[in-house]
Image: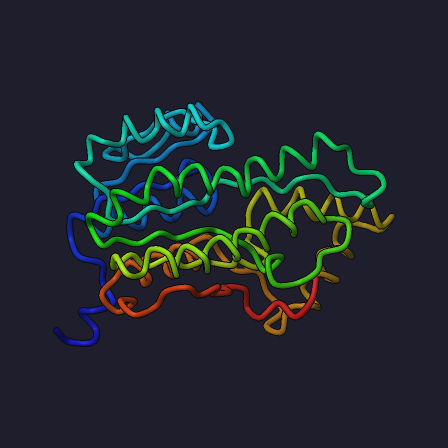
Amino acid sequence: MKVVDSLIPRQGLRVLVTAGANGIGLAIAQAFHEAGARVHVCDVDEAALAALPEGIAATRADVSREAEVARLFDEAAGLGGLDVVVNNAGIAGPTAGIDEIESEAWRQTIDINLNGQYYVAKRAAGALRESRGVLLNMASVAGRLGFAYRTPYAASKWGVVGLTKSLACELGPAGVRVNAILPGIVRGPRIERVIADRAAQRGIGRDEMEQENLAKVSMRKMVEPSDIAAMALFLASPGGANISGQALSVCANVESL
C-alpha cells in the first residue's frame, strides 16, 4: 500500500457517532459518510436528527441515561457490527466559581461528559474486539490544562483522558485502538455561548474575551469542526494503525486557558 493510500479509511466501515447531529459530531459523521462508511448517530436534538443528510441512520438518545445507550446499540445493530465508535457527546457545563456552581450542574456535566462515555464504551467493547476496531473519545484541551470557572468541564475531560489511556491498555491486546481527541477553540455556536458566559463572569465585553482567548493560542486562531473530523478519519485509517493510548490535541497550540 502506498503511504498516501494509507491515509484514507477503508470503504464500508461501520461507524457510530454520539451527538452526531450537530457541531463536531456532525462534521465527523459527514466525513465518514463521504469516505464511504455506513454511519449511525445519536443526538438529543430531534430537529437536527431530522435534518441529517440522507444515508446517515439516527437514534434519539441521551448518553447520560444507560437505558437509552442500550437502545442506541440495539438500533445500531443494523450496521452488522462496529469498526469505529466516536464517543463525542458532551456539554460545556456551568461557568462560575467553584463556590457558586450548583451541585446539580456539576452532576449533569459529569453524567454526560464522563459517565456517558463509560456507558458507550461498555456497550462498544465487545463489537470492537470482534472487528479489532477503533474507539475515539472526545476530550478537550481542558483535559490537559487547568480551566478557571469551568471546573466541572475540565474535571470531566481530564477523566476522559484517563478513561482513554486505561482502555487502550485494557483493549489493546485484542487489537482495539483507543485514542482521545482534544479540540481547542472550535468555531461554532457552542464556543460563542462559552465566550459570552465567560465574558459575563469576568465583567468584560464579548470581543475582548474572544481576543483574550485567542492570545493564549500560539497560532492566534480557532480551529474548524472539519479539522477535528480530519483527525478522526486519520485515526481510523491504516495510517493510524499503531496509534493508541494517545491524547491528541487539535488546537492550533492552546498554551493556557
Q: Quadrant of the C terminus?
A: bottom right
Nearer to us in this view, 218 or 76:
76
Q: Is residue 28 above or below residue 238?
A: above
Residue located 75% across and 62% down the image: 212
Q: Position of residue 253 (x, y in %)?
A: 58, 70
Q: Is 223 on the left-hand or right-hand side of 26?
A: right
Q: Position of residue 229 (x, y in %)?
A: 39, 54
Q: Is residue 76 above or below residue 148?
A: above
Colour option used: rainbow
Q: Which residue is farthest left?
A: 1
Q: Is 48 on the left-hand or right-hand side of 193?
A: left
Nearer to us in this view, 70 or 169:
169
Q: Quadrant of the N terminus?
A: bottom left
Residue located 70% across and 48% down the image: 195
Nearer to us in this view, 179 or 229:
179
Q: Position of residue 23 (x, y in %)?
A: 48, 43
Quarter-wise, where is residue 200 in the image? top right
Q: Position of residue 227 (x, y in %)?
A: 43, 59
Number of marks drawn: 0
Residue located 39% across and 32% down the image: 42
Quarter-wise, where is residue 189 in the image? top right
Q: Is residue 80 above or below residue 257?
A: above
Residue located 46% across and 60% down the image: 165
